[in-house]
Amino acid sequence: MKSLVKRSATRVDLSGGTLDCWPLFLLGGDCVTINLSISISTHATLVPRDDGRVDVNIRDLKYAKSFATVKEFLACRDPEVKLVRHHVAFWKPEQGFYLETFSESPVGGGLGGSSSLSISIIKAFSEWMGRELDVYQAVNLAHNVEAQVLGKMTGTQDYFPALVPGLNAIHYTPEGARLETLPSTSEFWNGQLSLVYTGQPHQSGLNNWQVIKASLDGDKGTLRALEDIRKVSWDVYAAIKSEGWDQLPKLFDREFEARVRLSSSFSSPEIDRLRQAALKSGAQAVKICGAGGGGCVMVWSHPDRKQKVEAGCREQGFEVLGVKAAL
């Protein structure tokens, strides 16, 4: 059988992050999470074998190892293959294979890289096994496998742009998630959005779990911050639907303020220093990506000032990622 080569987008979350985690979207009114797929991708290459041998190459972790059988691979407890092992345990292949994975995202970048990689792996195995999954089935599978890997509750927003690239609004109600892809152009986002890496990885599972626990314990400050994030996200949705693009910088500022109130772990000295450098260089707003605490930060600038803002970030030692919208 031929090689199965799969690629999936990562994303920048624009608003409503964390609310995609069950059961947070059930604690208030209906929620919407909005994200934009970007040109940073994850990759999986799957080559079925005629014998039982399993060869795994996790390029980002510089891990390559061979196993005599699928059973031997599933017994392996090397941390580098934990994600792949759980996926293989679900699919239960009866023959061997070669699997190579890699991600263009910085490790712990806050761009949904591990979730995107899960989707790339699912795309490859589902084609090999002849089992077609719709968007919601693939999201549900990836979500549950990643919860097995992390041992914690996880959100679902990151899987949608990996399956349906675009400007996506994911609506969360008691019925679950519903995807709405919004009309937009790459030129608009490319002209104003910069993505800057702080140099420090984040820990999304840990940060989100702290918020979930505090919410279920009834912490009033956490619940107020979540409600403010929910309101901001609906305002972002309304601004996009009405093409009120000039409203976005102030909304991103509101989101930043609510998010750092949600938990002190969402910010960090690196994020604070990056924010100061960007705003001093003329940026209009700064948005924490993912669960924060490190990783990447989205910087929003007027097109005329974008290059100066990026230069100001580089002068402070931060890495500006060459990224474009993937619509």
Image (tube, grey):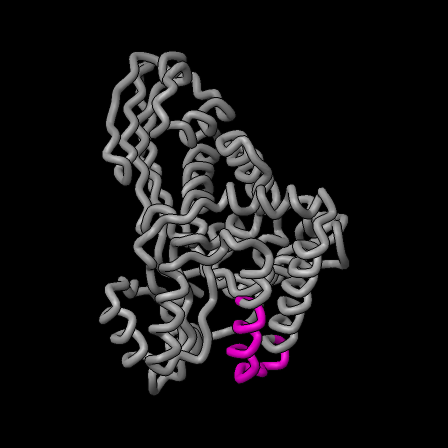
Residue 245 left/right relative to 4 = right
Tell me residue 315's x, y (percent).
23, 71
Residue 170 left/right relative to 5 = right
Which residue is pictured at 70% across the width and 60% down the height? 224
Which residue is pictured at 38% across the width and 74% down the height? 190
Q: Nearer the viewer, residue 8 or 152?
A: 152
Residue 251 sits inside the magenta stretch:
yes
Number of labels in the image equals: 0
Which residue is pictured at 35% across the width and 67% down the height? 274
Tell me residue 8's x, y (percent).
41, 50
Q: Is residue 311 above or below residue 74?
A: below
Q: The C terminus is located in which quarter?
A: bottom left
Q: Nearer the viewer, residue 99 or 31?
A: 31
Per the rendered image, the range of residues in magenta is 241-256
Q: Is residue 204 above or below residue 255?
A: above
Q: Is residue 161 above or below residue 302?
A: above
User: Which corner quadrant of the image does residue 76 belong to?
Assistant: top left
Tell me residue 68's x, y (percent).
29, 12
Which residue is pictured at 68% across the width and 49% down the height? 24
Q: Which residue reaches farthest bottom?
A: 304
Q: The N terminus is located in which quarter?
A: top left
